[in-house]
Amino acid sequence: SIQRKFAEPYPHVHVMVIKEMKQSDMAGHIIDFSTKDFGDNYRTYQKIFTDLNASVVLCDYMSSSGCYEAALAMKIPYIVTMAFALSPDASASYINNNAFTMLDSTTLHMSLIDRLKDMFITPIKIYRRVSPAVQRLNKRRMEAGCSERGIEGDSHVHRNNLKLVNSLYGIEAARPLGPLVELVGPILPRHYDPLTPSLSGFLNKYSRVLYIAFGQHLILTEKDNQLILTAVLASIEAGAYDGFIWAVGQHPSGALPFDQDKCPFAHIVTWAPQQAILMHPSVSVFLTHGGAGSMYEGLYAGKRLIVYPFFGDQFPNAYQVKRQGMGEFLQRKSDQQEAKHTLIRVGLDLDGAYQRNLNRYKALVQIHARTGPIRGADLVEEVMFASVDGLLPYRCEHSRYMSVLKAYNLDLYLILFCFLFCIYRLTAKTLEIFS
């Protein structure tokens, strides 16, 4: 693939083509990659916390190696921030919120076979792939003088800490959340970069523009580029759009196989002020990878969505978009005809159903976005001023302080069973005596 072609000359580049790997297969690689500099990070965080005389620390879930470990070592209260409610106290028996396995957010639409695999087989596969990476992480911790063990996602990690989730019901599958989990999203920038003169001029010339962007970190394969570009050109020919903007990033694979000068309806950029583009009335549809930030920006702007996911929460987001009728889920295994018809269907929106459903979510996101930052700030202050030794005991479930029997009223059911059994035996004995 083109990624390998450009990465091979550089010994420090380790190439993984996501399309060729199952999400569960990536687990060990993700842990290794995100924690390879643990020692340096751990010491740097300790220095920063000391220099700032920090009263409370915010550590991002699974992407700030050494942060919460440094906070624990220095006895500083910390809060975990997440883009998706991934912690064990945000789960339920019908919820899939394991970062390494969640292809769908709930079991509602899963078959019995898929549920069996997800419940019993996948955890074994994950353990086999994650265990060596965790051992390497624990070795780095030991070398750095850190006593913590395990990984985020283990039930004991962050058990006593507040989690701020940049999400909301409607994107998150509805279920009861623990008292230490708070949905405060979406938190979006109040100010954003304006359109460049060339983008502004392009958007003012067209009225049905498709905006395409797949985030800062993804590199599309040549096959991805071909599938999408061919579908885009076919959908323009069908009248679904009259132009498109594609933010390709700085990657070598961003080069698209056509001459932009001969296609005035195409505008290819390496960087784009995404929020400004989405807020422009000429943009009608957003083709995205389905990352949380892009999802919220698209919904806030009221743009119909086509989601082309790669990993992580992008898959649940894609399913949510399709099931709520806000757009479509374009799978990477789609053939050319399917991709073309998906782009045309969402672009034309003949009965207006996509846009009607999208407008409801637009209102939902805009309402929550008004107060999200304030709510988040209030919770940070709560931890700063109301915690006891970094803990929030009043937010801990009282079941922690009870036996399992008492917490689930099993003792009461046991007493009832014994009582009914005694009545049964007494009745049986009485009947036996008088018979």
Image: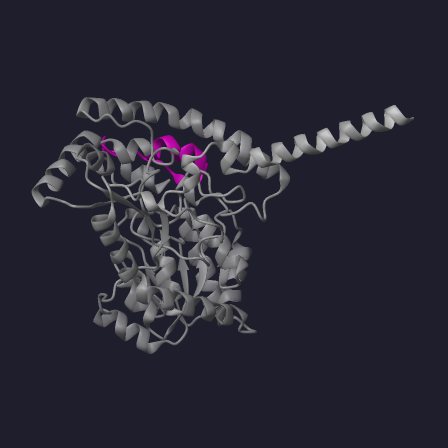
Does the segment drawn in magenta span residue 79? no
Between 48 and 101, the one nearer to me in the picture? 48
Name the quadrant of the C terminus.
top right
Between 354 and 141, the one nearer to me in the picture? 141
* Image-based side of 432 in relation to 141, left or right: right
What residue sits 30% from the left and 65% below the top? 275
> Could you tell me if residue 229 is visible in this image?
yes
Between 208 and 139, the one nearer to me in the picture? 139
Between 199 and 258, the one nearer to me in the picture? 199
What residue sits 59% from the left and 48% below the top? 109
Residue 317 point in image, percent of width and height: 45, 53
Q: How is the image coloured?
A: one colour
What residue sits 24% from the left and 42% below the top? 388
Residue 284 point in image, percent of width and height: 41, 70
Residue 145 point in image, percent of width and height: 18, 24
Q: Which residues are magenta?
A: 8-30
Q: Is residue 368 above or below residue 90?
A: below
Does the segment drawn in magenta span residue 26? yes
Which of the 4 image quarters holds residue 142?
Answer: top left
Which of the 4 image quarters holds residue 50?
Answer: top left
Instruction: Determine the residue located farthest toward the front in the rendered image.
Output: 434
Residue 89 point in image, percent of width and height: 42, 42
Name the quadrant of the N terminus.
top left
Instruction: Determine the residue located farthest toward the left in the rendered image.
Output: 51
* Image-based side of 149 in relation to 306, left or right: left
* Image-based side of 415 in relation to 61, left or right: right
What residue sits 42% from the left and 48% below the top? 313
